[in-house]
Image (cartoon, grey):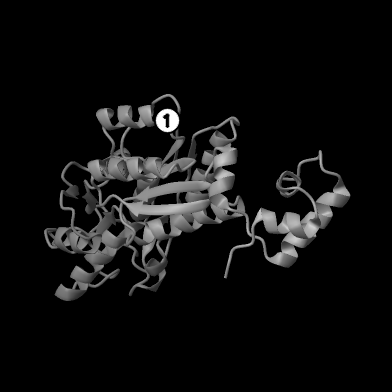
Amino acid sequence: MRRVSIEDIARHAEVSHSTVSRALRGNKRISLTVRTRILQIANELGYTPNAIAQSLQQRQTNTIGLVVTDVADPFWGEVVKGVEAVSMHNQKALFLSASQYDPSRQLAVIEVFHQRRVDGIIVGDSQLGDAQMNRLARIKVPTVFLNSQVDHAYPGFHAVGIDNYAGGVLAAQHLWALGHRHLAYLGSTKRPASNQMRSLGFAETLRGYGLPPGALATHHSTSLADDLRIGYELASAIDYTQTTALFCYNDSIALGALTYCRSVGIAVPEQLSIVGFDDVAIAQFSMPALTTIAQPKVALGETAMQLLLAVLAGQPSIDTILTPTLVVRHSSAPAPKGTAQ
């Protein structure tokens, strides 16, 4: 079926092509009566505006590029929901791609988005170095970094993130209050900045409580494998003769550790408490349900998209750090009797 054109509407309305074009754009030089009549005819004919032509006129494509590390990661699935909700409400289409934790691939995706003439870009878990940031600065596409893994204090760029240190503090407070005095942190260097801050908040809080040296074991995986596998492998290296609690970088690592414990007969939470980070949907359905530090995932996506829209509109734009919360479920419990010192 042939697409209805502006010429078709002009012929039915018995006006010029330019009059129809102005009326469809809401130009006040066209009387309200004529505009109303033209819009009615356009609806009756089933007219759909040509997005490419509009973008050429407005110098905007009404598209946004979003690059995340891994589309299979349940955390990013929730974040994308937030980004998409705001972009759709503002009539912006979303292009989504993944970098697989590779800074070079991350920049390559951004380059493709630039070639597609997107209006703006949101970069999740950025690991771009100085040379790559300089290239991005030359591209001059409005960009918002979401949960960045490096310092992006460059003019013209903006950021939204979570207070990772505070999350580590919450985990330490919770486990200390339950009487745990021999603990371990299981992390991943795939996300160096957030991993470091969660580990640091956890360790410094425990030291502040008086945890003696050697009572906290810290294990950081350098593998790019799936987080469930990382959690399983890290958990297998722990000495459980004394350790009574694990704090994991994210829920996937925690669930991997939980799977290991089940495979070797370590009872959770009777013998070992486990705390994750993120509060992905599956966390509440694990056996036992996972205690975790919740990120406002949808809100992170919404906030990043709202910030990008403000940048595109030339409005005041302020970087934002959101606060995590503790969600207590069944994978954490008081330390076994006789273990607290």
Q: Position of residue 145 (x, y in %)?
A: 41, 39
Above or below residue 169? Residue 334 is: below
Residue at 64% x, 62% y: name it: 4
Q: Position of residue 293 (x, y in %)?
A: 40, 54
User: In this rendering, would 188 be left or right of 331?
Assistant: left
User: In this rendering, would 133 be left or right of 212?
Assistant: right
Residue at 25% x, 57% y: name it: 246
Above or below residue 334? Residue 164 is: above
Viewer-nearest residue: 111 or 259: 111
Viewer-nearest residue: 211 or 294: 294
Visible residue check, residue 336: no
Viewer-nearest residue: 33 or 6: 6
Viewer-nearest residue: 186 or 178: 186
Quarter location, residue 316: top right
Tell me the amino acid under the disc marked 1: Lys
Mark 1, residue position? 140
Question: Which residue lies most toward the top here?
Answer: 155
Visible residue check, residue 59: yes
Callout 1: helix, strand or loop? loop
Above or below residue 310? Residue 39 is: below
Query: Crowding at label 1, few (<14), some or many (≥20) Cα neighbours within 10 Å?
Result: few
User: In this rendering, would 281 be left or right of 245?
Assistant: right
Q: Position of residue 11 (x, y in %)?
A: 75, 57
Q: Position of residue 292 (x, y in %)?
A: 38, 59
Residue at 68% x, 54% y: name it: 7
